[in-house]
Image (cartoon, rainbow, N blue to C red):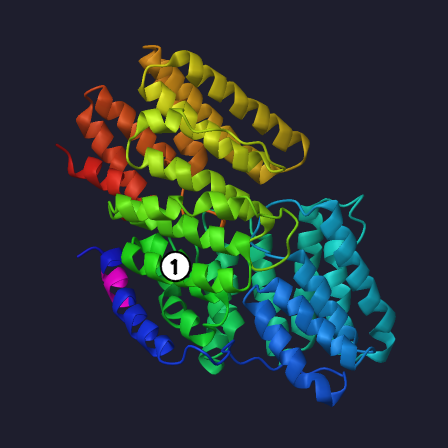
């Protein structure tokens, strides 16, 4: 049996056991165990620890409200402003540039913490100085520079206070945030994971440890290392919607589709209860992807039918859970695109209605699906329009300094061009371009906002080779696609051959 299948089976049994345990205690709030000593009034310690538990599960809106309740009882608590500033940054795993509004509000909180810092301990001043790096001189320092400065500050804090578990935890996730998505040695992910695993053994009920281990190992080559954390996180903090969703990152990496559907639908229900719509949509995107790999088209269709009503209420600036507003718009575009492409319903894909949003990388999802659908139908005119639209979005992202997303859309643009060439019977040129797209995709990583590419570039390359009758080459490319995206239905069909 393949290693990832062994892992999938182990995770599946464990997840079913945990789900049964959680069902037995549905009402009491359970966020895990966090204790963060501060110099604030002793009476606010329980409130502060609860806000910290919410922050560790990326429940940012609730965490901010929690820290605000601390300030209502102790207006001199500098660390409550620190917690608000870090919560304002939202999901550190998001590669998107923070908006001016996010920077402004985060900076205000960081400055409020700094004003109170003279009353705080030296350790606390280290936290406050570190979070300030995320927002300081944003007009002159780009986001990458600020993220690296934050990581260095947290490294110094953790070194100065080796017994401070929270400093080590926040430093570890800062390492992952700062890691390059093109580093295929995953050295920084492994460094962070080693810190977190050591602490998890001593603090098995800490939500941040389980959560950040999954993020540290959220790449195909390392996913198996997150097995224990994925088994346990949802049981540590079942009251947090993101804690219910997060195990599916590991489930998706190993092709454990049944468990991904189950945990994401629970996350969706939890997110709706708190009106955290982007988080709900994020969970649905993962769930629909898993259902489509299982060939459960009717279940995927049922999810698709939920999308319009939720999408109409999305707020791009909402601060709620781990999923930023852009994640809701991404899911609203990705779910119908996946539903068409994974069923090879090319006419449906070609007819998808593009919508304009504040996030070009989400709009690109629809244009990419339209390009693939039109090309498979031989409609070169429509394919050309979609390709050119992708090129325009790549240019906008590049101009805006969104380097990560510019590269993701560039890969889609090249793939669309390759299929336009293929539909135009220029097959040698098409293969060259499709190989380029596949190689570029191999040198980056999918964003946490997505369970996987709409159509993996290497799988698309294999499709081309298969259509040309080059079955042995196609099979090799399907197998390569499976190494990156285990359990994908169409790559599996292709790898098995006719």
Kindly identify the residue that appears in the image at 48 percent across and 51 percent down: 281
Residue that carries the numbered disc 1 in the rendered image: 265
Residue lying furthest bottom: 42
Main SS of residues in magenta: helix
Residue lying furthest front: 309
Kindly identify the residue that appears in the image at 23 percent across and 22 percent down: 467
Disc 1, SS: helix
Q: Position of residue 484 (x, y in %)?
A: 35, 45
On the rendered structure, is 302 left or right of 197? left
Kindly identify the residue that appears in the image at 41 percent across and 74 percent down: 235
Q: Is residue 301 visible?
A: yes
Rendered image quadrant of residue 458: top left
Q: Quadrant of the N terminus?
A: bottom left
Rendered image quadrant of residue 251: bottom left
Q: Does the magenta-highlighted stretch encompass residue 414?
A: no
Residue lying furthest left: 498
On the rendered structure, is 111 left or right of 486? right
Q: Position of residue 307 (x, y in %)?
A: 45, 45
Kindly identify the residue that appears in the image at 41 percent across and 56 percent down: 249
Q: Quadrant of the C terminus?
A: top left
Which stretch did the figure color magenta? 6-10
On the rendered structure, is 190 left or right of 493? right
Q: Position of residue 345 (x, y in %)?
A: 30, 30
- Which of these two is toward me, 6 or 258? 258
In the displayed structure, 282 sits above or below 262; it is above
């Amino acid at each position: 049996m393949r290693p990832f299948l062994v892992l999938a089976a182990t995770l599946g049994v464990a997840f079913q056991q945990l789900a049964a345990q959680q069902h037995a205690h549905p009402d009491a709030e359970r966020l895990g165990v966090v204790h963060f000593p501060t110099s604030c009034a002793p009476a606010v310690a329980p409130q502060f620890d609860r806000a910290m538990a919410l922050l560790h599960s990326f429940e940012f809106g609730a965490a901010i409200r929690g820290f605000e309740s601390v300030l209502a009882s102790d207006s001199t608590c500098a660390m409550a402003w620190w917690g608000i500033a870090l919560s304002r940054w939202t999901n550190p795993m998001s590669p998107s540039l923070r908006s001016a509004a996010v920077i402004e509000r985060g900076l205000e909180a960081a400055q409020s913490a700094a004003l109170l810092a003279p009353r705080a301990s030296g350790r606390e001043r280290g936290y406050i100085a570190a979070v300030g790096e995320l927002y300081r001189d944003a007009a002159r320092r780009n986001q990458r520079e600020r993220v690296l400065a934050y990581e260095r500050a947290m490294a110094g804090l953790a070194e100065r206070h080796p017994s401070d578990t929270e400093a080590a935890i926040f430093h570890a996730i800062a390492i992952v945030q700062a890691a390059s998505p093109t580093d295929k040695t995953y050295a920084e992910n492994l460094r962070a994971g080693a810190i977190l695993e050591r602490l998890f053994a001593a603090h098995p009920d800490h939500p941040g440890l389980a959560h950040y281990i999954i993020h540290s190992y959220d790449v195909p080559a390392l996913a198996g290392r997150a097995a224990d954390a994925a088994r346990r996180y949802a049981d540590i903090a079942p009251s947090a919607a993101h804690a219910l969703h997060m195990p599916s990152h590991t489930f998706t990496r190993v092709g454990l589709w049944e468990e991904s559907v189950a945990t994401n639908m629970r996350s969706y229900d939890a997110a709706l209860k708190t009106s955290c719509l982007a988080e709900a949509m994020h969970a649905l995107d993962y769930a629909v992807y898993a259902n489509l790999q299982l060939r459960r088209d009717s279940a995927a269709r049922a999810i698709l039918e939920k999308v319009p009503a939720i999408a109409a209420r999305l707020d791009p600036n909402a601060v709620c859970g781990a999923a930023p507003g852009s994640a809701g718009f991404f899911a609203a575009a990705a779910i119908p695109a996946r539903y068409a492409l994974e069923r090879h319903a090319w006419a449906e894909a070609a007819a998808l209605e593009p919508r304009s949003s504040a996030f070009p990388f989400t709009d690109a999802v629809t244009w990419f699906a339209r390009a693939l659908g039109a090309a498979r139908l031989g409609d070169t005119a429509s394919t050309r329009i979609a390709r050119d639209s992708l090129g325009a979005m790549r240019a906008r992202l590049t101009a805006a300094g969104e380097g990560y997303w510019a590269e993701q859309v560039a890969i889609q643009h090249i793939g669309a061009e390759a299929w336009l060439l293929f539909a135009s019977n220029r097959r040698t040129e098409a293969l060259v371009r499709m190989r380029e797209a596949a190689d570029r995709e191999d040198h980056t990583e999918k964003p946490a906002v997505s369970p996987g590419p709409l159509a993996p570039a290497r799988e698309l390359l294999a499709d081309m080779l298969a259509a040309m009758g080059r079955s042995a080459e196609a099979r090799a490319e399907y197998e390569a696609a499976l190494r990156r995206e285990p359990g994908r239905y169409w790559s599996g069909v292709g790898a098995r051959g006719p």
